[in-house]
Image (cartoon, rainbow, N blue to C red):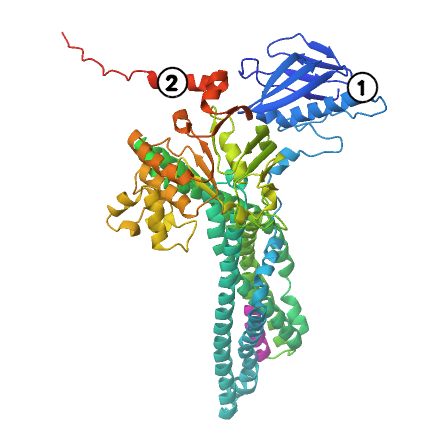
Amino acid sequence: MLAWVAPDLDQYLFFASGALVLTSHRLLSRAPGETDWLVWQLAPAQSLLHRDHAGVGTIELFDAGVRLGAWHHTLGMTPAVRRLAEQFARRQKQLADPTLVIEADLAACPTCGTPFAPDQDECAVCNENAPGPSNTWALLRLARFAKPYRAPLIFGFILTLLSTAATLVPPYLTMPLMDDILIPFQNGKPINYDLVTLYLTGLVVSAFLAWLLSWARTYLLAWVSERIGAGLRTTTFTHLQTLSLQYFGGKRTGDLMARIGSETDRINLFLSLHLLDFANDVLMIVMTAAILISIDPWLALTTLIPLPMIVWMINMVRGRLRHGFEKVDRAWADVTNVLADTIPGIRVVKAFAQEHREVARFREANDRYLGVNDRINKIWALFAPTVTFLTEIGLLVVWIFGISQVASSTITVGVLAAFLAYIGRFYTRLDSMSRIVSHTQQAAAGAKRIFDILDHVSSVPDAARPVPLERVEGRIEIRNAGLRYGSRTVLRNVNLSIGAGEMIGLVGHSGSGKSSLVNLICRFYDVTEGGIRVDGVDIRSYSLTSYRRNIGLVLQEPFLFFGTIAENIAYGKPEATREEIVAAARAARAHEFILRLPQGYDSLVGERGQALSGGERQRISIARALLIDPRILILDEATSSVDTTTEMEIQEALDNLIQGRTTIAIAHRLSTLRKADRLVVLDRGQVVEIGPHEELLARQGHYYALYQAQLRVEAEPPLEPAKEVQSV
């Protein structure tokens, strides 16, 4: 056996389980619900073709042009089907050349059923969506954002060193205060007030210097961290703008907002506060340890008794916290996703009276977030008190050992007092360092989610050495173009030539590939096969910015940004004068209704233009396209969502817009495309007919069927109102 697949649709496209097996000599098939197998001996003239469209894949076996069998499957089976088709093609080559060796393909993923390659032991399909490992080293990648601030960071480190040293002076002065002044005074000797004044002055000066230096380093490092965070947010958002629509199609808005917002805030807090405390703790522990060893090495050794246990606990808890905080981030993203879905769609929520449903969704997401946090808190609630307990035990050991040393006159009381003061600071810093684990893992999880965005490479890359483009003429040539969305083929073998200034209408059933073809021309996606040329140059050779500046887009559902009408019209040309904006609005038949608004062109349109009607938003969108004066114009169902009167007004605006431009229009109402020079009919991702309206009608092919179906719908009489039934 070379390969196998289990088609999950029957001939009527109902869900069912079948089998298709390829061996070195035969192709065997068992239909859903059957026990008998159909068998075909492999022959050189045979071919196995695979195609998919609109969520359904088809495998066909041909022999000398005659179809022997056909099998259907959902797109989830596509990887396995491709593997079988590849093995079939290799076997056909082996039939022509018996010296070739074909390797069997028996192993498959137990989760998704995808067959493995001969040298493969993990499923690429499953691993593609699996989260990668996260660790604290992700924080080190933030160093590139800190490079512009190297001098302030170095100065901040020096201030930290000096402030830490200043805080270590007071305990050292307690030794002579006790041994040279207080204890002799208890034994009857007079107090040397000059010496007392000197020591107390030293205490005051060191405390003041510690405060001043601590304030300076805190402000300086907070200043730097805020700028690192701002640079991180800007870089992430800038990178997002370079990614293709394919990336955004697989992401939730709330998740991306949470990454750029809350994750960068968390990293900011870590850099400005927790990392500063960590550095201060390390310096304090190192310098305190040095002082303790210089005072009494054996007494200093007793302070390290709880240290191995604390280090072991930190290492044990770190991994659990890391995975826990990753789950917290994903749970919080789910909460944000509900908000991002519900608030912009509040009109639909209220129209269908689904407020309780959305509240339930939010409560469910919020409860998941609460549950994940509870699990982390259980770990942390045990860890932090245990560290505190161990440090208290260590302090008790120091007391016991210190008292024995004083009793044997090995050290003085002043040395023990200073030692205890230093030990208190040592253990306090050790406890603080253990607590930094939580904040570090939080920041590391956030940094990983940020770098997941920054590491993503756009599927529509900009040209490394772009061809200069000032203004295009508008000649478009599409040659053998194909497009796949993941495992789904939406366009294949599309060939079309559009002259400069020509108007083309794209027609076809829903899902036939009209919008996908427009996406390729706009280069929202790149072709997976073939190519597209504009003015004789492959569009992938142009700079994305310069190329799209020559394209005007009017969508079925126009999107307006929160702001004034003038700002929305001038979105593609921010430097436009008020005269240019008004001229574009006049040409789009929008000037009259704009003047009726309270603030005219300075009126706010509201969130996504909700303050305007659908027809008014569409005319603003047309004015926006007119202002940039594009050479290529895309009209995607520009009049489908408005009434007849508004459609006539918009059509007048469109007549002004299309003059002298290469225009590609999509419309379900075929009557709106009669002015098109040619109509292009698509069916299942392929161009099936091209020609003028009258010519296509005369052929009585696909376009004729579409036209007749629409005539029948328009000719249907309106429903009569129901008659009242009088009760007897």
**Quarter where residue 113 is shown:** top right
Q: Please, which residue is most extreme toward the right here?
A: 99
Q: For the residues carrying marks 2 and 1, which lies nearer the camera in this image?
A: 2
Decide which of 319, 506 is in the foreground and name it: 506
Check disc 2: other Cα within 10 Å, few if <14, some if 14-19, many if 20+.
Answer: few
Gap in angstroms between the C-alphas marked 2 and 1: 54 Å
What residue sits 28% from the left and 17% below the top? Answer: 718
Decide which of 385, 569 is in the foreground and name it: 569
Residue 395, visible in the rendered structure: no
Q: Which numbered disc covers residue 95?
A: 1
- Tell me the element at label 1: helix
Q: Which numbered disc covers residue 280?
A: none
The magenta segment is: 413-425
Residue position marked by numbered label 2 in the rendering: 711
Check if residue 92 falls in the magenta segment: no
Height in image: 135 above or below 356?
below
**Quarter where residue 430 is shown:** bottom right
What residue sits 49% from the left and 86% below the top? Answer: 201
Check if residue 415 falls in the magenta segment: yes
